[in-house]
Image (cartoon, rainbow, N blue to C red):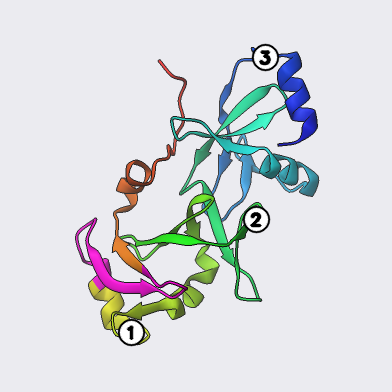
């Protein structure tokens, strides 16, 4: 978190939180009141001060004020870099894939040291190359189709290539927030 934000929080500790203004879309873009934020410094400021509370609600600490973020997908959107590594939509390197999930539409969600992140749709071809069968063969169309029709929560029989290889579970899109501990639409506590 930026030092200026920490100082502002100390100076004004009781500023009310804001809901419904900021959104993270499934491509990793910040939207302010429905408009994509294009200013690089502002996007960087949001990313450096992007946090989660104990309810699983993600927010941007804007000085003394928490601006809660609606999520179209997951708290993170993950991209594949040219060098073979992964990074979040805020530019943080992903060092560890702890779990991998495949939903009913074929979307891939990776649970990382940062939290759960949807793999960017532009990287799905690359993602398919990362999937292996139990015996280490690349997953083919038939294995992917079989994985997608499994019941939510079941093992797919596929593995996300890595060290170590990570089993891929089937998880329904609507079940992800509860299963992975985040809120898509944060609301004021009652």
Judging by the rendered image, the residue that carries numbered circle 2 is 92
Residue farthest bottom in this picture: 137
CB under 8 Å between discs 2 and 3: no
Judged left or right of residue 54, residue 149 is left
**Looking at the image, is 140 positioned above or below residue 45?**
below
Tell me, yes or no, whether the highlighted magenta stretch contains residue 156: yes
The quarter of the picture where the C terminus appears is top left
Residue 67 picture location, percent across and down: 61, 28
Residue 170 picture location, percent across and down: 28, 61
**Looking at the image, is 17 positioned above or below residue 32?**
above
Which of the two labelled residues, at mark 2 and mark 3, occupies the earlier sequence position? Answer: 3
Tell me, yes or no, whether the highlighted magenta stretch contains residue 189: no
Which of the two labelled residues, at mark 1 and mark 2, occupies the earlier sequence position? Answer: 2
**Looking at the image, is 160 positioned above or below residue 27?**
below
Image quadrant assignment for residue 152: bottom left
Circle 2 packing at 10 Å, graded few (<14), some (14-19), many (20+), is few
Q: Residue at x 54, y 55 (%)?
A: 77
Judging by the rendered image, the residue that carries numbered circle 1 is 140
Q: Residue at x 30, y 47 (%)?
A: 175
Image quadrant assignment for residue 8: top right
Residue 36 picture location, percent across and down: 66, 46
CB under 8 Å between discs 1 and 3: no
Judging by the rendered image, the residue that carries numbered circle 3 is 13
Number of numbered discs present?
Answer: 3
Camera-near label (1 vs 2) is: 2
Highlighted range, magenta:
147-166
Q: SS for tag 2?
A: loop
């Amino acid at each position: 978190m930026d030092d200026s934000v920490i100082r502002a929080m100390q100076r004004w500790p009781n500023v009310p939180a804001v809901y419904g203004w900021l959104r993270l879309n499934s491509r990793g873009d910040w939207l302010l009141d429905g408009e994509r934020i294009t200013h690089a410094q502002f996007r960087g400021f949001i990313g450096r001060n992007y946090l989660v509370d104990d309810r699983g609600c993600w927010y941007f600490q804007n000085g003394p004020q928490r601006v809660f973020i609606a999520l179209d997908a997951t708290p993170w959107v993950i991209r594949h870099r040219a060098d073979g590594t992964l990074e979040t939509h805020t530019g943080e390197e992903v060092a560890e894939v702890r779990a991998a999930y495949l939903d009913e539409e074929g979307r891939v969600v990776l649970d990382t040291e940062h939290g759960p992140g949807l793999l960017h749709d532009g990287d799905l071809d690359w993602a398919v190359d990362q999937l292996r069968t139990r015996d280490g063969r690349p997953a083919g169309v038939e294995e992917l189709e079989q994985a997608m029709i499994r019941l939510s929560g079941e093992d797919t029989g596929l593995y996300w290539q890595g060290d170590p290889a990570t089993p891929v579970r089937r998880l329904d899109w609507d079940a992800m927030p509860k299963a992975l501990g985040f809120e898509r639409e944060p609301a004021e506590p009652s």
